[in-house]
Image (spheres, rainbow, N blue to C red):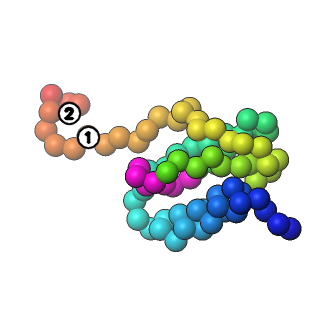
Amino acid sequence: MTLDPHTQGFLDALQRIDARRKKEMPAYDYKCNTCDLTMTILRGITEDELKPICVKCQAEMTRSYDSAPAVTFLGIGWGKDA
């Protein structure tokens, strides 16, 4: 099966991301506009944003902001120390 260049580029990016998975990188959630499939993609903040294609129905996915970011405050002055 031949993939269009956009989809092939996306799959290549996923392979590069898997290779760097051991490093800490921001995780971005994407949701399919058609079938509601969700996917988490690790991507550096300086990398260009991808427009992922759903692996289930081949529709375009959009960035999902449903989940709260994981933030850890270290040092004095946070929470009970304030």
Image quadrant where residue 59 sits: top right
Disc 1 residue type? Phe
In the rendered structure, the answer to whether residue 25 lies left or right of residue 32 reads left
Q: Which residue in the rendered view is the most extreme toward the top?
A: 82
Answer whether residue 63 is magenta in the image.
Answer: no
Task: Estimate the x, y position of residue 66 in percent, counting from the top left.
Answer: 56, 32
Image mark for residue 62? none
- Closer to the camera in the image, 57 or 77: 57
Relative to 4, residue 58 above or below: above
The rendered magenta stretch, by its main secondary structure, is classed as loop
Q: How many marks?
A: 2
Disc 2 residue type? Trp
Tell me which label, 1 or 2, sits earlier in the chain. Answer: 1
Q: Mark 1 = which residue? A: 73
Q: Pick the quarter of the image with the C terminus.
A: top left
Image mark for residue 78? 2
In the rendered structure, the answer to whether residue 39 lies left or right of residue 4 reads left
Q: Which residues are magenta?
A: 41-47
Disc 1 crowd, CA 10 A, few/some/many (<14, 14-19, 20+): few
In the rendered structure, the answer to whether residue 54 lies left or right of residue 9 reads right
Image quadrant where residue 18 sits: bottom right
Residue at (76, 59) in percent of width and height = 4
Relative to 73, residue 23 above or below: below
Task: Estimate the x, y position of residue 71 in percent, counting from the top left.
Answer: 35, 40
Residue at (47, 34) in percent of width and height = 68
Kind of element beneath mark 1: loop
Answer whether residue 43 is magenta in the image.
Answer: yes
Residue at (41, 50) in percent of width and height = 45
Residue at (72, 42) in percent of width and height = 60
Task: Estimate the x, y position of residue 58 in percent, counting from the top left.
Answer: 79, 49
Tags 1 and 2 touching, CB below 8 Å: yes
